[in-house]
Image: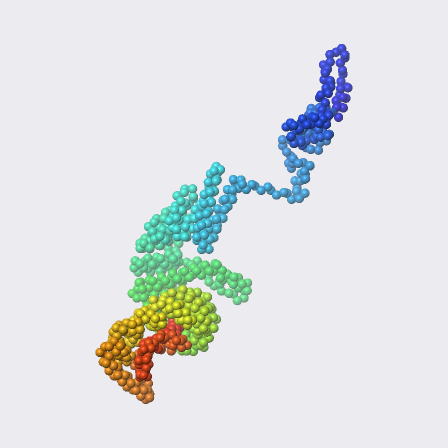
């Protein structure tokens, strides 16, 4: 097309004549070497091109002419922008710009400023311009690269905040070590964050609030872990940094740390410096700081300075704690008048609580009752109860402290306090103070005054009368006056049948009288009224044990154990009940738990020794018996068992130590001395045995057994005293026969007089009697007793019927295994006596 247009143009041009000079001559001359039409098909030319760098280039992306060659215009020249017609793209694929593009071109010309919504793809792309997103949802935003410095800083800052939160949560859970570790890690991350900002020249963007949070949390965690020096250093870093606003208030925390370290002068210094930092508008904060200053002065004994702080607080923002502290300071100084004035000022403190009547139900208004049911135990109600309890406690305790000091007698001082309370807004506490007055008499062991004070409430309103009668019943029960105790228990139940303490007192009286079934019913009724009454639950378990209902007793003690986890009495009762049920495995487990609570209780250790001894485990039994002996070396059954154990083990020399201890505990019991002598004889130390028998004969001249062994040893050793001791032995045997005859005739006449030796054995608690009290455990004594000396038995076999059975042989029946069953019963009775009615005073 370009060539045709060009020819038409040449025809319309006026040609010069032949005579004229041809100014364009030579331009149309054709040179065959310039013909490029066949270059694409010329193999030699193509080979040459391939050998050059141009031939190794990738093919152009633009439009190519026919046959894959370069685009040509009219088969001769490449078109330019100034020539007419449409030209193709360049060899490098760049689109034609400017006027070269025709009017019918489909692609929009490239411009410097793109139109809104136009993309380089244009209509050739998968989607055209769609500003309303009619073709579907817009594609997601491209995520920012994570490796950018700004993103790294942002993520690091987020991680620091997360570590601070984790540290605080760990502290709230009580995991102090974990909280401190998280706080330290947050500090390390924060320092890395600051360094990265400085490296990027972003120092002006440092987050001071984050730095403050990291340091403050770290200091708190140091203080929680009692690392006080590290905490003080961290607080000092915060306080000295002028860029942290209001950091001076943290000196209160530093003062608290100095207070824990008992460095009171520095604590006061810090409190005063922090007080200077707090503006006057923050009255509550200033009041708390001054309260701390006053307490430190009290610790230092500077009561005058403490009074100055407390009086300032009472004039600005009075509180019960401050008023109570003020009373204590005046009491320490012994100023009666100021004590009275401080107590009166304490009674003027306002609780700032609404009327209690709002919690009373309305009979007809169901909607109000539903709302009341929701709010009667909510958090606000609990706060009100705590404030009420704090006020009552401060007033009652203050009255107890100053009553003996403000008047000549305790009674007069308490009466003055009661009168002041009656004239104040806390008139409801007057009766409680009078009850406390009776309890104070009881603590001073003035029982008559306590009883008289409580009796004055008999004609008061039912609530006060019930409380007084309950305490009176308890007092008479302690004095073993069961008639009066029963009377006032009935009075208390008449005034308030749902009073669990009155029911427990009634059950205690019946328990003491032996009426266990009725006592059991009163304990159960007390538990129905108050399931948390531990006295009723414990006494119910004891009652069930007495009547043989061991399973019910065990159930009661298990419930009580759930309430009182570490009570030794409760754990003992569970273990003892399992032992009575012959469940040795459970009994052993619970006794082991009891030893963990009271590791020095000799009775419990001896019980464990008894259990292992019954199971045949001598080594474990010895260990527990020995531990029991270490804590209580005067326990005769334990001493006796240990001596028998060493005799059975053929270590008679070691057994002597325990029998000597027994002879010291019971010096008038001859059997211990005989056992010592017998151990010397069995170990081959006859000279020492002879000296011991002589000592026994001097102390107990009528003892037949001692004379028998003296005759034998002297004969064996060839001593002249043998005949002398034989004569004494005959006289002693005759005297004993006469004594036995008189005792037999006296018993026939009904005198019922017991033999002296038997009575003395009962008083001293011999092992034989303990074996009888032990019940079934006593039957195991015969096979546990140590081996007897066969020579002794053979020598005196013919006269054995003439000898007192209790002295037949020092290592015979007297050396039975110690019985702790009797101790078990005594311990059971001891707990019953101590725990019945325990803590029956109203809380």
Instruction: Compare residues 253 and 373 and report the one nearer the observer.
Output: 253
Quadrant of residue 789 in the image?
bottom left
Judge from the rendering whether residue 21 lies leftward or rightward of residue 284; answer left or right: right
Q: Identify the residue shown where x is 52% and y is 61%.
A: 374
Task: Please identify the residue farthest to the top as the structure is shown.
Answer: 19
Whether residue 305 is visible, yes or no, is: yes
Quadrant of residue 105 in the image?
top right
Task: Please identify the residue farthest to the left as the structure is shown.
Answer: 720
Instruction: Compare residues 659 and 545 and report the one nearer the observer.
Output: 659
Q: Is residue 588 above or below residue 217?
A: below
Q: Measuring from the top left, give residue 521's x and y in whole percent.
A: 46, 75
Q: Identify the residue shown where x is 38% and y is 74%.
A: 784
Task: Please identify the residue farthest to the bottom as the structure is shown.
Answer: 749
Q: Identify the residue shown where x is 35% and y is 60%.
A: 343
Give the image's coloring scheme: rainbow
Could you tell me which quadrant the C terminus lies in?
Answer: bottom left
Numbered label tally: 0
Q: Identify the residue shown where x is 47% and y is 73%.
A: 551
Judge from the rendering whether residue 340 lies leftward or rightward of residue 466; answer left or right: left
Whether residue 840 is visible, yes or no, is: no
Instruction: Compare residues 97 and 448 and report the one nearer the observer.
Output: 97
Q: Measuring from the top left, give residue 419's x and y in whole percent.
A: 36, 65
Judge from the rendering whether residue 256 lies leftward or rightward of residue 729; answer left or right: right
Could you tell me which quadrant the N terminus lies in?
Answer: top right
Instruction: Compare residues 422 and 264 and report the one nearer the observer.
Output: 264
Q: Measuring from the top left, give residue 303's x and y in whole percent.
A: 31, 55
Q: In this view, does 515 lie above or below 74?
A: below
Q: Measuring from the top left, give residue 192's x and y in whole percent.
A: 46, 42
């Amino acid at each position: 097309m370009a060539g045709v247009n060009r020819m038409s143009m040449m025809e319309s041009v006026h040609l010069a004549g032949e005579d004229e000079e041809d100014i364009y001559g030579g331009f149309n001359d054709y040179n065959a070497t310039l013909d490029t039409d066949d270059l694409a098909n010329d193999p030699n030319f193509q080979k040459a091109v391939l050998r050059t760098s141009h031939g190794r280039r990738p093919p152009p992306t633009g439009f190519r002419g026919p046959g894959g060659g370069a685009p040509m215009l009219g088969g001769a020249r490449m078109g330019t922008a100034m020539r007419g017609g449409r030209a193709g793209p360049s060899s490098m694929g760049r689109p034609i710009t400017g006027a070269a593009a025709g009017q019918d071109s489909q692609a929009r010309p490239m411009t410097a400023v793109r139109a809104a919504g136009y993309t380089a793809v244009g209509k050739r792309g998968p989607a055209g311009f769609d500003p309303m997103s009619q073709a579907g949802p817009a594609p997601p935003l491209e995520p920012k690269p994570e490796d950018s410095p700004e993103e790294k800083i942002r993520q690091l800052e987020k991680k620091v905040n997360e570590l601070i939160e984790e540290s605080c949560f760990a502290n709230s859970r009580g995991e102090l070590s974990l909280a401190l570790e998280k706080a330290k890690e947050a500090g390390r991350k924060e320092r890395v964050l600051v360094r990265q900002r400085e490296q990027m020249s972003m120092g002006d963007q440092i987050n001071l609030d984050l730095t403050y949070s990291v340091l403050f949390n770290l200091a708190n965690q140091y203080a929680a872990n009692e690392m006080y020096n590290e905490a003080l250093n961290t607080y000092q870093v915060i306080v000295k940094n002028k860029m942290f606003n209001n950091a001076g208030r943290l000196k209160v925390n530093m003062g608290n740390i100095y207070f824990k370290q008992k460095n009171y002068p520095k604590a006061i210094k810090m409190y005063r410096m922090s007080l200077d930092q707090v503006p006057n508008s923050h009255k509550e904060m200033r009041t708390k700081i001054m309260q701390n200053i006053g307490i430190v002065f009290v610790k230092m004994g500077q009561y005058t300075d403490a009074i100055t702080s407390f009086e300032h607080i009472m004039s600005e923002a009075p509180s019960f704690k401050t008023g109570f502290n003020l009373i204590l300071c005046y009491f320490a100084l012994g100023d009666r008048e100021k004590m009275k004035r401080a107590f009166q000022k304490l009674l003027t403190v306002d609780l700032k609580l609404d009327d209690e009547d709002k919690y009373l139900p309305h009979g007809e208004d169901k909607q109000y009752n539903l709302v009341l049911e929701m709010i009667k135990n909510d958090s606000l109600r609990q706060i009100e109860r705590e404030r009420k309890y704090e006020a009552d406690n401060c007033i009652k305790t203050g009255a107890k402290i100053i009553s003996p000091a403000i008047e000549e007698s305790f009674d007069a001082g308490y009466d003055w306090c009661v009168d002041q309370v009656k004239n104040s807004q806390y008139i409801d506490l007057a009766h409680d103070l009078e009850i406390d007055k009776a309890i104070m008499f009881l603590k001073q062991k003035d029982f008559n005054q306590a009883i008289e004070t409580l009796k004055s409430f008999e004609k008061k309103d039912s609530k006060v009368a019930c409380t007084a009668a309950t305490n009176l019943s308890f007092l008479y029960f302690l004095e073993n006056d069961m008639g009066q105790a029963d009377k006032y228990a009935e009075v208390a139940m008449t005034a308030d049948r749902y009073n669990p303490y009155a029911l427990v007192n009634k059950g205690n009286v019946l328990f003491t009288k032996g009426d266990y079934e009725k006592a059991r019913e009163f304990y159960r009724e007390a538990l129905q009224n108050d399931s948390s009454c531990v006295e009723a639950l414990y006494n119910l378990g004891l009652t069930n044990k007495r009547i043989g209902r061991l399973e019910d007793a065990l159930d009661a003690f298990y419930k009580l154990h759930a309430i009182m986890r570490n009570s030794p009495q409760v754990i003992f009762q569970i273990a003892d009940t399992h032992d009575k049920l012959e469940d040795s495995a459970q009994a052993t487990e619970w006794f082991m738990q009891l030893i963990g609570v009271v590791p020095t209780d000799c009775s419990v250790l001896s019980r464990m020794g008894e259990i292992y001894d019954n199971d045949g485990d001598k080594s474990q039994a010895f260990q527990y018996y020995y531990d029991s002996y270490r804590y209580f070396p005067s326990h005769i059954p334990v001493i006796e068992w240990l001596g028998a154990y060493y005799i059975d083990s053929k270590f008679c020399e070691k057994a002597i130590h325990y029998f000597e201890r027994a002879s010291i505990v019971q010096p008038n019991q001859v059997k211990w001395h005989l056992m010592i002598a017998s151990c010397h004889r069995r170990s081959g130390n006859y000279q020492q045995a002879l000296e011991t028998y002589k000592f026994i004969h001097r102390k107990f001249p009528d003892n037949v057994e001692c004379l028998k062994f003296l005759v034998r040893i002297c004969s064996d050793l060839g001593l002249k005293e043998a005949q002398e001791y034989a004569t004494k032995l005959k006289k002693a045997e005759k005297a004993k026969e006469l004594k036995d005859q008189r005792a037999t005739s006296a018993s026939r006449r009904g005198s019922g007089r017991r033999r002296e030796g038997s009575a003395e054995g009962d008083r001293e608690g011999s092992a034989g009697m303990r074996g009888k009290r032990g019940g079934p455990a006593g039957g195991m004594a015969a096979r546990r007793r140590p081996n007897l000396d066969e020579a002794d038995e053979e020598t005196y076999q013919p006269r054995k019927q003439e000898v007192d059975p209790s002295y037949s042989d020092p290592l015979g029946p007297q050396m039975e295994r110690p019985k702790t069953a009797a101790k078990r019963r005594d311990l059971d009775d001891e707990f019953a006596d101590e725990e019945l009615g325990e803590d029956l005073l109203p809380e």
